[in-house]
Image: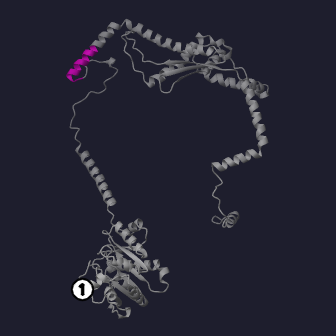
Amino acid sequence: MMFNRPRPIDVTSRLWRVNETQSDATGDGPIALLRAVIDLGIRHKVSLSVCSMAGILVAALYAHSLPPTYQATATLLLEPRQSAVTGGEFGAQQTLDLNRADSELQTIKSERLLSAVFESLNLKDDPELGRSQPSFIGSLLGRLPLGHLTADRATVDQTEPEAENAGIELANEADRAAFLNFMSRLNARRVGQSFVIEIEYSSSDPKLPARVANATVSGYIYQTVGFKEQIARARTEALQDRLDSLARQVDAAREAMHAGTLPAIATPDADARIIGAALSPLGPSAPRKSLITALGGVIGLILGFGVVVVRMALDRRVRSARELAREMDVRCLGSIPNVPGAKGVPWHITSPQQQKFVAAIRDLRTSIEIACTSLRNDKSIVIAVVGWTPGAGVSTLCASLAQLINRGGRQVTLFKAADGDDHRAGSDSLPAVSLAGAVFAGLMPEQLNFEDVGGIAVLPIHSRDTNANLFTDFRNPRVRRIFEAARLRGDVLLDLPALRHSMDALALASYADAVLVVARSGQTTIEEVSESVQLLRRAGANVVGTVINRTRG
């Protein structure tokens, strides 16, 4: 079986097409088809020219063999008819709609009217309407053995089916054939959707078309007026009885209208028939309370959906890692669940919530390692974590990452900000030794005394001395030397202060190999994360991704 194996020609084509420069022009389309037609015409121009000349010659001979045909058209405008009750100026006009116009058109096309015109003009002896004379081409074909058979069969097919349905009394088959030929030459049609009807007749005799078209119009008028005359004659004798009957119907209808009932006698002249009288209702028909209640519930539900959609459109707070990754041009490296009371990675996991928290921290560490693969090269790296506002959980996140890295066998140094999850600690709680104090005092890296917290070397960023915090420039080369000395011992984590309250985070983030921006679920907006990324990048920081913290569900 070779269902999934390409044929030899496919393999060959794939081999030689590998290094071939592909052309922008495709092999199909209207332009390519036009080029192919032109090329074919140039290659076979002699044969095409001979065939074209032969066709022109045959067409010219056929055109000259056809007899000339003349057409004449009579125009008729339909107008509303008058009722023939009194037959004169007292007749009531009736309306004329498009359906009525179609009916009058069918009347003009009827065999009864056309047969009257046919007989009145004595067209049954017209040689043109008899058996059709063969044309030049037809005479040539008639000389062949099959020509007579074809001509006779065509004549029989033309006359037999329609002659059975002609419905007129003519003398013989020749008269019927002449009448059918007459009907085929006459054409009655409406002009668009108007009330104008055009009656057209075609003939080789230049005088006959006008006679036939005008005779058809006159025949239609004769038939219409004759019908009115018959009605008027029939109604003259019973006019008085008719007036009496109408008077009785008018009186009955007037009395019923004043009484609020139906007429007591039949009213056949009302052009309407009563088939059901109105009865007293058995109960109220409005308001339909159940329907209104249900409709109110549906409208309320629709409005509720509208409010929710508007709130979602106006609410720019981040709630999921997928939303953060969709709105930002940087990757979302992790989603940390909200675990109340979690301050780091515990040694012993006692609840499913702690298990989810530790698994999320481990996944975040793996994502960071993957993002920093080209930066590490078997050496320590500096990772900075920063948020836009305090309370984003940056300190807890940094402490958890430091604990997880330390328990993995690597030394970790944590530079901790004072305004962690507790927003901003008091100045009295800060230790005497800090990064700002060391830079302000001009201390060397080996003179610093790091605090050992669970095997992690911790040094606060800000000092207890307010002057040191105010006058320390974190772009000082001493800061770089301190970070390089810490890098020699292992990985470095920078727990940076919030960008909204301190620009020191921008200066310190420039020393990091990778920067993570933390967004708190349900509080941090997309605009705040975007502004944080832009500020860090303008400061020269390498933002490798974002992290959404304290997610729910």
User: Would you place residue 241 above or below residue 331 in this image?
Assistant: above
Which residue is drawn at the image coordinates 61% and 13% (left, top)? 170
Q: Position of residue 127 (x, y in %)?
A: 68, 14
Q: Name the dominant secondary structure of the magenta segment.
A: helix
Q: Residue 447 colored magenta?
A: no
- Asked if residue 253 lies in the magenta stretch, the reply is yes
**Number of dots carrying numbers:** 1
Q: Is residue 89 above or below residue 436?
A: above
Q: Position of residue 413 (x, y in %)?
A: 37, 87
Q: Is residue 333 visible?
A: no
Relative to residue 349, is residue 227 drawn left or right? right
Q: Nearer the viewer, residue 32 or 445?
A: 445
Please tell me in which quadrant of the rendered image residue 204 appears.
top right
- Depth check, front residue: 312 or 224: 312
In screen coordinates, is 190 left or right of 90? right
User: As displayed, is residue 137 above or below residue 370?
Assistant: above
Residue drawn at x 40%, y 77% is 515
In the rendered image, residue 326, in percent from the top left (x then y), is placed at: 41, 65
Quadrant in which residue 67 is drawn: top right
Task: Identify which amino acid the numbered label 1 is placed on.
Answer: Ser
Residue 5 against residue 189 in the figure, above or below: below
The residue at which mark 1 appears reads as 429
Left or right: residue 130 compared with residue 187: right
Q: State which quarter of the image contains the C terminus.
A: bottom left
Mark 1 closeness class: few <14, some 14–19, many ≥20 residues within 10 Å: few
Q: Residue lying furthest top in this view? A: 237
Which residues make up the magenta segment?
248-261
- Tell me how the rendering is colored: one colour
